[in-house]
């Protein structure tokens, strides 16, 4: 189990804006695998630019981009 201090240090070392390290595991011969989570629970759709805290489906929101 990761301590809060370890997670804070890994978050600082990763230095990605808007993300926290929530857990980590070290595998011999592979390295360290980090699980990260967004600090802000909203994101911006790369296609339409809308900001939402819910996943919107491609077909429902972006109907103009689909073929009939």
Image (cartoon, rainbow, N blue to C red):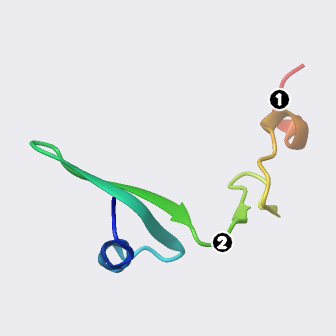
- Numbered circle sitting on residue 40: 2
- The image position of residue 16, as x and y in percent, is 43, 73
Q: Which residue is mark 1?
A: 66
- The image position of residue 63, as x and y in percent, is 89, 36
Q: Is residue 21 shown left or right of residue 37?
A: left
Looking at the image, which is closer to me, 67 or 38?
Answer: 38
- The image position of residue 7, as x and y in percent, is 36, 71
Identified at 72% across, 65% down, the residue is 42
Element class at badge 2: loop
Q: Is residue 68 shown left or right of residue 47?
A: right
Q: Residue 38: which quarter of the image?
A: bottom right
Q: Residue 45: which quarter of the image?
A: bottom right
| Category of crowding for the residue at label 2, using alpha-carbon neighbours closer than 10 angstroms: few (below 14), some (14–19), many (at least 20) | few
Q: Which comes before the other along the chain, label 2 or label 1?
A: 2
Q: Is residue 16 shown left or right of residue 9?
A: right
Of the residues tagged 2 and 1, which is closer to the observer? 2
Identified at 53% across, 62% down, the residue is 37
Looking at the image, which is closer to me, 49 or 38?
Answer: 38
Is 36 rendered above or below residue 13? Answer: above
- Numbered circle sitting on residue 52: none
Identified at 90% across, 19% down, the residue is 68
């Amino acid at each position: 189990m990761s301590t809060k201090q370890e997670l804070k240090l890994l978050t600082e070392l990763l230095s990605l804006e808007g993300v926290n390290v929530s857990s980590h595991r070290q595998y011999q011969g592979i390295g360290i695998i980090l699980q990260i989570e967004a600090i802000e629970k909203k994101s911006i759709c790369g296609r339409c630019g809308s900001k939402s805290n819910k996943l919107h489906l491609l077909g429902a929101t972006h109907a103009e981009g689909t073929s009939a």
